[in-house]
Image: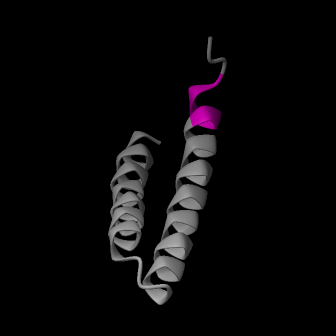
């Protein structure tokens, strides 16, 4: 299945960072357009990515 778990964790860290940054960018644009529900949802996604990042960072 996974040949090198360390490489997979590093890949997941990179994906986690990209998802968090994209969600934060969408949240900021949504705030600018006064779409508050979308903004809150995207900021929650970005916050959850921080939790995931810390969890996966400990695994390395």
* Secondary structure, magenta segment, majority class: helix
Task: Give the image location of residue 5, x and y in percent.
Answer: 57, 27
Residue drawn 49% across the image and 85% down it = 33
Nearer the observer, 4 or 39: 39
Residue under the point 38% across and 69% down:
43
Give coordinates of residue 31: x percent, y percent: 43, 83
Vertical relation: 58 (above or below) 42: above
Please name the colour scheme applied to the rendered image. one colour
Residue 56 position within the rendered picture, expressed as x and y whole percent measured from the top left: 42, 44
Would residue 55 be found to the left or right of residue 9 on screen?
Answer: left
Between residue 33 and residue 53, name the one nearer to us: 33
Q: Which residue is at 42% across, 64% downward?
A: 42
Please identify the quadrant where the N terminus is shown.
top right
Picture quadrant where residue 44 is located: bottom left
Q: Is residue 15 left or right of residue 60?
A: right
Q: Magenta span has 15?
A: no
Q: Residue furthest top?
A: 1
The picture quadrant where one finds residue 41 is bottom left
Q: Is residue 41 rendered to the left or right of residue 24?
A: left
With respect to residue 50, does 12 lie above or below? Answer: above
Badge count? 0
Residues 22 and 36: in front is 36
The residue that appears at 37% across and 47% down in the rendered structure is 58
Q: Quadrant of residue 7?
A: top right
Residue extending farthest front: 34
Which stretch appears magenta?
4-8
């Amino acid at each position: 299945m996974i040949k090198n778990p360390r490489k997979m964790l590093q890949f997941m860290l990179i994906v986690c960072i990209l998802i968090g940054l994209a969600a934060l960018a969408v949240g900021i644009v949504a705030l600018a357009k006064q779409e508050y529900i979308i903004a809150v949802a995207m900021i929650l996604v970005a916050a959850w990515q921080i939790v995931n990042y810390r969890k996966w960072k400990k695994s390395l």
